[in-house]
Amino acid sequence: MGQILKLHNQLINKEISSLELTKEYLKNIKKKNNLNAFITILEKEALEAAKEADKLLAEEDCNILTGIPYALKDNFCTKNIRTTAGSKILEPYVPPFNATAVNKLNDAVLLGKANMDEFAMGVSGESSAFGPTKNPIDETRVPGGSSSGAACAVASNQAVFALGTDTGGSIRQPASFCGLVGLKVTYGRVSRYGVIAMASSLDTIGPITQDVEDAALVLQAIAGKDKFDSTTPDVIVPDYIKDMKKSIKGMKVGIPKEFFYVEGLDNDVKQTIEQAIEKIKKLGAKITEVSLPHTKYAIPVYYIIVPSEVSSNLARYDGIKYGFKAAGAEELLDVYEKSRAQGFGDEVKRRIMIGAYSLSAGYIDAYYRQASKVRTLIRKDFENVFKQVDCLVTPTAPTTAFKLGEKCQDPISMYLADILTAPINLAGVPALSIPAGEVKGLPVGMQIIGDQFRESDILRLGYAFENA
């Protein structure tokens, strides 16, 4: 039984109240504030929400998430609550509305807004304007990014679960580094309305949890079509919990050879995943080697498409409409330049410049359009493979959690940390990271990849492995 269901049963049996539970988690947040998991802590609001949840529980007008304390990555808009996206330029911004995913979790108790790499640009949790987040397993190491605070909060019992965003691995990689379950959904499975955009054709929303069952429960609550987001298709939302508990005997599992020979893959991590694959085989799944030949182009394609969309999406932060405005600027152009120069961090500026270059006249055909064509080939590789198998299994990250500051002066090395996760976003398919073992006391994540809108398949395989 997962953590959420255990707590739900205790709540409905009146063994504990949501108020008591919330107070315990708020105590933990104060005790562990050195980890820097939160940008904004909502103590007063959380206690009020817990009291309301207790009323619903008493009246039996509740769902499985009613009264459960959770954390929210700080790029989800929250009505009358500051939303910074980890950036100085949005430090004073208070949205007038909630993101759709937040509304769907209305009966759960929001404890606070979790720290993150600025505008979700980063793989380590170190690019936040509010300071780096630490890995609770080893405080000298990164928790992964960009959903750094969300993963840290769940791993250190500062929240039962968290919502994050994943554009190139930003849920799965921190889940891997912190020994958690992280679910990247099919593009469009969960509404992006009210979530601050980084790269609109790649951004997805999903849960970070202690176990696979919790991930399925949260997905059940937030999935589905939304009239405010035209990228959410009218595709039925299955019963993930029921489907998850089916046997995996006879399931066809592909091992893409390209994912086991990528640059920088640690040999101990590789061996840990190979051992996990042997366990899956013993559970009755049929293992077969497959090929995704265009995988080697995924990182260069990703780092052309993402900065291009970043440069377009971040043009709205100009010091005029909302957010930070530079002091002492008189001319309109001065306001734009000084506000953006002072408000954006180094990684954001780097990506804006790369993106503006890729989209500029004379270069757009050579870079952005060419990258878009190769992205189509990457997507077709996945389409072809899923005609042969139900799921794919790979490592989530090429290494375990690296040291704080280790890669800060080497952007290329930092970008290569996404080498195993970015192809999945380019293809728009779902993937699940689950703990597969440890190397020198640090968690190793196994990535299970499924076909579009086949989250049930990856949850089923993940659940069977976890229980074994």
Image (tube, grey):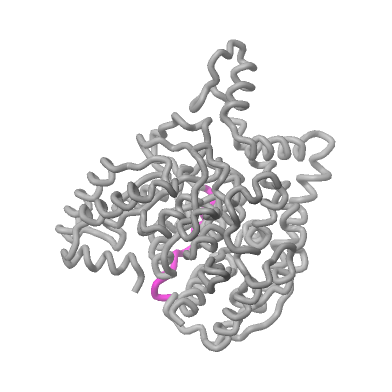
Q: Position of residue 9 (x, y in %)?
A: 24, 68
Of 369 and 268, nearer the camera is: 268
Q: Which image quarter: residue 298?
A: bottom right
Please say if 456 is above or below 289.
above
Q: How many marks?
A: 0
Question: At 54% across and 63% down in the image, what residue appears?
Answer: 176
Question: At 76% across and 64% down in the image, what residue appears?
Answer: 294
Whether residue 30 sits left or right of residue 383 in the image: it is left
Question: At 64% across and 76% down in the image, what residue appears?
Answer: 271
Please say if 234 is above or below 315.
below
Question: At 64% across and 40% down in the image, what residue appears?
Answer: 347
> Taking the image as drawn, is residue 112 in sight?
yes
Q: Position of residue 11 (x, y in %)?
A: 21, 63
Q: Position of residue 235 (x, y in %)?
A: 49, 62
In magenta stretch: residue 330: no
Of 125 and 137, nearer the camera is: 137
Q: Position of residue 2 (x, y in %)?
A: 36, 70
Of 96 and 447, nearer the camera is: 447
Whether residue 139 sits left or right of residue 329 in the image: it is left
> Taking the image as drawn, is residue 312 in sight?
no
Query: Which secondary structure class fits the magenta region best?
Result: loop
Whether residue 117 sits left or right of residue 361 in the image: it is left
Is the N terminus in the top left, top right, bottom left or bottom right quadrant?
A: bottom left
Report the magenta residues as a range.
230-243
Please say if 376 is above or below 132.
below
